[in-house]
Image (cartoon, rainbow, N blue to C red):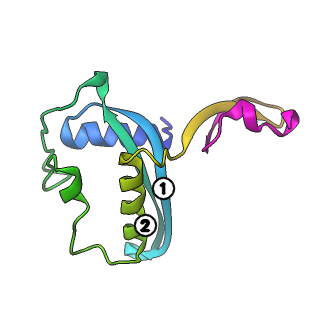
Amino acid sequence: MLFNSPDAAVREVFEETGVKCEFHSILGIRHGHNAPFGKSDMFFLVSLRIADGKTHHAIAVQESEIAKAEWRDRNDAFESQHIAKGSHMDHLYGLCRMHLGGTYQGMGLQNLPAGFGRDGTVVTYSNADAEGVMASNL
């Protein structure tokens, strides 16, 4: 079965914590080389909301996957001795703060026709509404 990034994020949060979430947006993407095991990796920072309009959900840690999970105060969550000033994580944490403050929405997704004579759709991520940015409409 194939999953797109939002589906994978929602699934992983549920599997590892028991918290049912809904996708809101992709806040950032980090692409790095020389990761563990000599691999490249991509890290997606996503904004999720607890499903069904709830404001709290009990956490049930899946110990085979993660050691700890907890709800944290939003101000406390951004303070970490492990985040080097000016690093990629400092930037991603900044995007989170801006998102919480309502000044950054991140990228949403749209399922658009694949084109090139192919059937089906592809997931396209952007900061703009698809209709307003179609080259054929500009």
Q: Which mark is residue 28?
A: 1
- Determine which residue is flagged by label 2: 91
Tell me residue 57's x, y (percent).
Answer: 17, 32
- Residue at disc 2, secondary structure: helix
Q: Residues within 10 Å of mark 1 (few under 14, many from 20)?
A: some
Range covered by the magenta-colored residues? 121-138
User: Looking at the image, which residue is at 37% across and 74% down?
Assistant: 36
Let me know if residue 7 is in the magenta part. no
**Closer to the observer: label 1 or label 2?**
2
Amino acid under label 1? Gly
Counting residues from the N terminus, which is met first, the one under dot 1 or under dot 2? Answer: 1
Q: Residue at x 41, y 77 (%)?
A: 86
Q: Residue furthest top?
A: 52
Give SS at disc 1.
strand
Dividing the image into 4 quarters, which one contains the C terminus? top right
Reply yes or no: does residue 124 show up in magenta: yes
- Residue 42, compared with residue 14, is above or below; it is below
Q: Quadrant of residue 15?
A: top left
